[in-house]
Amino acid sequence: MDYKELISAFGEKHGIEGLASDEGTTSLDIDGMTVEIFHNEEDASIFLCSVVGEPPAEGQERFSALLLQANFLFKGTDGSTL
């Protein structure tokens, strides 16, 4: 299954009419949050990108340290990147 077929099948399965890939990029709006899906043709991987929120007003240093720890060798994110 190629990327366009995958996106089309995803849209069908979840009742999203007209979901299409524009040059390897697809955009979804989920509860007011935009999620971009990018297809990397070189290794057939897919990346999902989104802004998931704002950092806390207080404790930003601690918050940043937690994100760095989670990203270290993908240990806390199971292969994802924050």
Image (tube, rainbow, N blue to C red):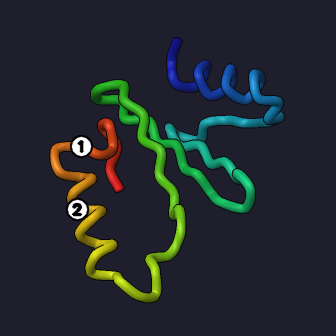
Expressed as whole percent of the image width and height from the top left, the position of residue 3 reads 52, 24
Amino acid type, label 1: Phe
- In the depicted structure, whether residue 81 falls above or below residue 39: below
| Residues at marks 1 and 2, CA–CA distance in whole angstroms | 10 Å
**Nearer the observer, 70 or 40:** 70
Residue 21, located in which quarter of the rendered image?
Answer: top right
Residue drawn at x 65%, y 60% is 33
Provide the residue designation for mark 1: 74
Q: What mark, if any, has residue 68 been given in the picture? A: 2
- In the depicted structure, whether residue 54 falls above or below residue 5: below
**Nearer the observer, 23 or 12:** 12
Q: Residue furthest top?
A: 1
Residue drawn at x 37%, y 35% is 40
Q: How would you rate the neighbour count of disc 1 (Cα within 10 Å): few for under 14, some for 14-19, many for 20 or more?
A: some
Of pointers 1 and 2, the one earlier in the residue sequence: 2
- In the depicted structure, whether residue 8 falls above or below residue 82: above
**Nearer the observer, 32 or 39:** 32
Amino acid type, label 2: Leu
Q: State if disc 2 and disc 1 touch (CB < 8 Å).
A: no
Q: Quadrant of the C terminus?
A: bottom left
Horizontal relation, residue 48 to residue 64: left or right: right
Residue drawn at x 50%, y 75% is 54
**Nearer the observer, 46 or 54:** 54
**Regarding mark 1 in the picture, which secondary structure is present there?**
helix
Horizontal relation, residue 26 to residue 44: left or right: right
